[in-house]
Amino acid sequence: DTDLPELTRKDFRELAARAQLLELGRFVESDRQLQEVMTDFWSNHFNVYARKGPVRFLTSDYVERTLRPHALGKFEDLLLATAKHPAMLIYLDNAKSVKAGAPGTPAAKRKKGLNENYARELLELHTLGVDGGYTQQDVIEVARVLTGWSVTRPQEDELGFKFRARQHDNAAKTVLGTQFPAGGGQAEGERLIRMLARHPATARHLARKLCARFVSDDPPAACVGSAAQAYMRSEGDIATVVRTIATGGTFWAPAVRGAKIKSPLELVVSAVRAADGHLDGGVGLGRTLAELGQPLFLYAAPTGYPERGDAWMGPGQALSRMRFGIQFAAGRVDGISYEADR
């Protein structure tokens, strides 16, 4: 952050609020609500933190060009798009992950080399899951495969993905028992991403998360099983998996009906839509989300915001929700306009 000009430090809060407002506007106004729900889901699944260096300038681009276009498409395309976006590469430090002694880089001069942060979260959070059967050696091998996956420098171009061949570990690797021959370059990283996306453990991990999102925090095994099967049959087609969940018997079961607790974002968006309200262009709604505990793009850990409803229902959170409801009913929530008699 010390390399950023004074103006960007001074205006960070407004910049973050404007980025939040852009996404909130999409969530409230869009006619494609399922796509917006899934954009929110993937924004949390592939979380980035806006207060980490240049990521603050990249969050809107990350959502608009990476998450939203692939929200209901093939998971492997979404996964590859996130792996190449500079917001993710910077947030989880892969942009500075290089082979030992890679020449001509600040990382090499500081005697830094392989960085396992992104590799670990790619396996644990983004694909296989914590019980996905990988080892620490697999994490190391994945990190080696992805050395050289970096970003452009300001003097080269606008900030984007760049594969730096001189920083890539070209030796042979083995991930989950699969051989990656020497000399694979950028292509072996893309092969790895697609291999992980097609893995049965990824199907189970994503199926459970999606069933937890749409059905119950503790989803029925039948929901998870059918969703995982749909994932494998459709080669990771997200729309097919969501359709399978929504048309399955567990989705409508009395035991799970009304069991979900809305996140602060869901609470605010649903209230505005129910009142046929609109965002008036102010930045106050971002402050409201912060007061409720869920400012967009500002969760530091790669896990994303809590996914269980009870995380949002502690005494403090419940009081904030009551306050929001009272202020909303009185038309006193900054950033929202609506007809009071609706």
Image (cartoon, rainbow, N blue to C red):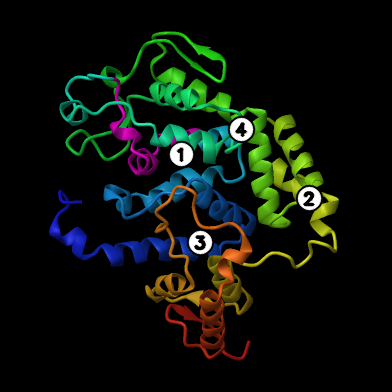
Q: CA distance from mark 2 to mark 1?
A: 30 Å
Q: Please, what is the three-letter code of the amino acid marked with disc 1? A: Thr
Q: Give the CA separation, mark 3 to mark 1.
A: 20 Å
| Residue drawn at (61%, 71%) of the image | 270
Residue 267 within the magenta-colored segment of the rendering:
no
> Is residue 81 shown to the viewer in this render?
no
Instruction: Please tell me which residue is depicted at 14% across the width and 59% down the height of the picture.
Output: 6
Please, what is the three-letter code of the amino acid marked with disc 4? Gly
What residue lies at 57% left-to-right and 15% top-to-bottom? Answer: 177
- Which stretch appears magenta? 80-99
The one of 293 and 244 positioned closer to us in this rendering: 293
The C terminus lies in which quarter of the figure? bottom right
Asked if disc 2 and disc 1 are in contact, CB closer than 8 Å, the reply is no
Of circles 3 and 4, the one toward us is 4
Residue 283 quadrant: bottom left
Q: Is residue 138 left or right of residue 34?
A: left
Q: Amino acid at mark 2?
A: Pro
